[in-house]
Image: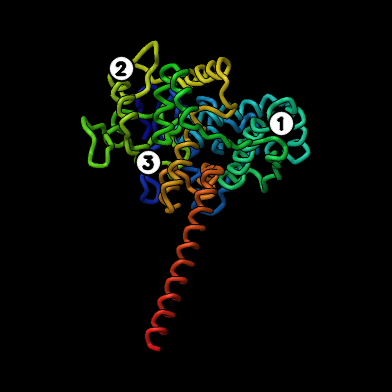
Amino acid sequence: MIYKRGNVYWFNFVFNGKHIQKSSRQGNKGVARDLEAAERLRLIKGEAGIERKPVKVCPTLKDFKETPPNVERDYGSFMDWVRADRSNKRTQDFYETCYDRLCEFKELSKTKLSDIDEPMIERFKLAHKETSKTTVNRYLATLRKALRYACRKQKLIDKVPLIEMYNREDGAERQCEFVFSAADYRAWLAAAREPLRSASVLAHDGGICRGEMLELQRDCVDLKQKPDENGFWGTISIRRGLKRQARRRTISITEEMAAVLFELLKQSKCEYVFTSLQDRTQPLSANTLADQHRVIMETCSFHPDAGLHALRHTFLTEAGRHTQNVKALQKLAGHSRIETTMRYVHPDDADMLQIASAVQQARSKSVTTVFTTSTQQEAAEVRKM
């Protein structure tokens, strides 16, 4: 049976007791009837075991990015797959930007996925020798993820070529080794403009990442009018802007954080906590924080690594001094691996001196105890004589 729904015709029939209903995507009734007949024939051939499975055509890197509107493909495109998880817009934007940079290298862009090999990847790296190694690594990571998806999920290629990333010795992925002292932090807050100042307080007192702050909404903030018995003013539930599920956690609100949150929520005219300076009904752009960070680094003499990420390092370093429960520290940080958490803890000379002093005190106490016990035993033997 052929019938019209909207502007296109649908066909509807029963085959071997199974109800088949599909859109022909055609506005011409005659063409729709031909498509219905073709669908019936395909089902008959399949039932008889003579239908051949369609062969997937291996696309070029450029064509594999995403499916254009109104085009059908026999494979799932990379960005269509990435966008299927709508929980993290920042991740989608990251992969789209990096994929575009890959396609700017014409040799790579026009090559079929099955023909991309190690020499071509090395030529891509050489073409970007003026680009920072960390940035090139991001492009290479995107290429590797796309090729793995093509191989493992879509079966478009048989294997993924070896993609060698730049390492730390090459100058890539330099880790933050800076933590704010109390004086550094006061100076930073004095120099920072809003909303960078508020973001700095949340990073310093709660270890919250920039992306998590930008995605923070009212329903995640349980802010009380007075502190509890532990001095906390409520909790923040981190469940948006996550890099991975391990980042879901609950953070206690300090008095300084409460003052910041009360002001931000009063200013906000939408569901977001951090809002645009020009329009409080819109969320804050990451560019605003980046611009304010750039200005403060150009006008003040802070350490090159100073910033929101260093404030998160500061929080976790201080937290690490107050616990021996590394699993709890890992959960507080929102890391899936304890090795990652350890990179955020930076012991200094005072920490090592404190450990050495504790060892010395324990040894001294032990020697004193042994000496006292020995003296008591000698005194007892004298009394017996």
Q: Residue furthest top?
A: 278
Which residue is drawn at the image coordinates 39% and 31% (left, top)? 10
| Left or right of 267, for residue 148 | right
Q: Is residue 295 above or below residue 62?
A: above
Q: Where is mark 2, residue-wise? A: 267
Q: Could you say whether the residue bearing mark 1 is in a helix, strand or loop?
A: helix
Which residue is drawn at the image coordinates 66% and 44% (left, top)? 157
Camera-nearest label, 1 or 3: 1
Query: Is tag 1's residue or tag 3's residue first in the polypeptide sequence?
Result: 3
Pointer 2 local density, CA inside 10 Å: few below 14, some 14–19, many at least 20:
some
Q: CA distance from mark 2 to mark 3?
A: 59 Å
Q: Where is mark 3, residue-wise? A: 13
Q: CA distance from mark 2 to mark 1?
A: 48 Å
Q: Which image quarter is the N terminus in?
A: top left
> Across the whole image, how many numbered discs are drawn on residues?
3
Q: Is residue 73 above or below residue 193?
A: below
Which residue is drawn at the image coordinates 44% and 75% (left, top)? 375
Q: Which quadrant of the view contains residue 203?
A: top left
